[in-house]
Structure formats: C-alpha cells, structure tokens
Amino acid sequence: MPSREIHNDIHLVPLIVPVAARTDNSAIVSAIIDTLGYQAVELALVTGTNTDTTATFAVLVEDGDAANLSDAAAVADDYLVGTEALAGFTFADDNECRKIGYKGSKRYVRMTVTPSGNDSGNIFLSGVAILGMPSSTPTPTLS
C-alpha cells in the first residue's frame, strides 16, 4: 500500500498524443521535451491493439541543445537507462507499456518510433515524458 507520494516531484508532458489509427510505416516522431529544471527523464510508450500481424516497432532517442532539435543526434547507450531495443515492440505487444530513461547532458530530447511491416493493419500508440527530480517543487499539474 502506498505510503509516499510523488505527485509534487514529477511533471508529465505529452510525448506522443493519441491519434486515429496509423496505417503505414511512417515514423512517429514525438514532441521535443525540454528538460530544463529537471534532473531525470523517463520516456514511456503505451501501445493499443495493433492489428498487423507482421509489424515491428524500433525506437530511437535523440538529444540536442537547440530548441527545435536541428542539432539532434542519436543518444549514446551510456546516456540511456534501459535500451532502445527493449523499448521497441512488435504486433504481439498489445496494450502494454515500454519505457526508456535519459540521463544525458543535453537540454532537449525526443523519441522516434519507426514501424516496419505494417502493411495491412492499424497502429495505436501514445506516450508521455515523465520529468523528475525537479529543481523546485511543487511541479505544475498541467503541461
């Protein structure tokens, strides 16, 4: 039974917002997350019921110092908590969550999920960035 709260110590930011079913292999690029004021970042994905029986989904995390990520570079494995491979998923991973942490030194971070083999089905995917260890509390309720 929970005896502690984290409500005032985390800030949630939309990463990938829910949309109508995606029906092709187009990359799904997340929002750019500004980490200013936070020492911890976790990127979480939520899958829906994906109907293509051959689809796979690769994850890439990028970071940079430009607000528009014009300087984006793939994050080195040393700056990830978990792996991009473990954050990826297949058609069989319906209604599940995946996560990957970022502990790099850049201000901005984003995630790209690239489907392959999605030639006859629908993709349902959303995600949230969880910012933690804030420089001041309480954190905002809205983002």
Image (cartoon, grey):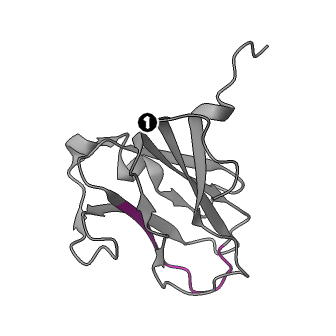
- Identified at 58% across, 45% down, the residue is 11
Q: Position of residue 87 (x, y in %)?
A: 46, 51
Residue 107 against residue 26 in the figure, above or below: above
Q: Position of residue 39 (x, y in %)?
A: 38, 38
Residue 117 against residue 108 in the figure, above or below: below
- Identified at 74% across, 12% down, the residue is 3
Residue stretch in magenta? 109-123
**In the picture provided, is 29 more to the left or to the right than 9?**
left
> The disc labelled 1 sits on which kind of residue?
Ser
Residue ID for mark 1: 135
- Identified at 42% across, 59% down, the residue is 34
Q: Position of residue 29 (x, y in %)?
A: 46, 75
111 in magenta: yes
Residue 103 quadrant:
top left
Determine the secondary structure under disc 1: loop
Quadrant of the drawing holding the C terminus: bottom right
- Identified at 64% across, 70% down, the residue is 17
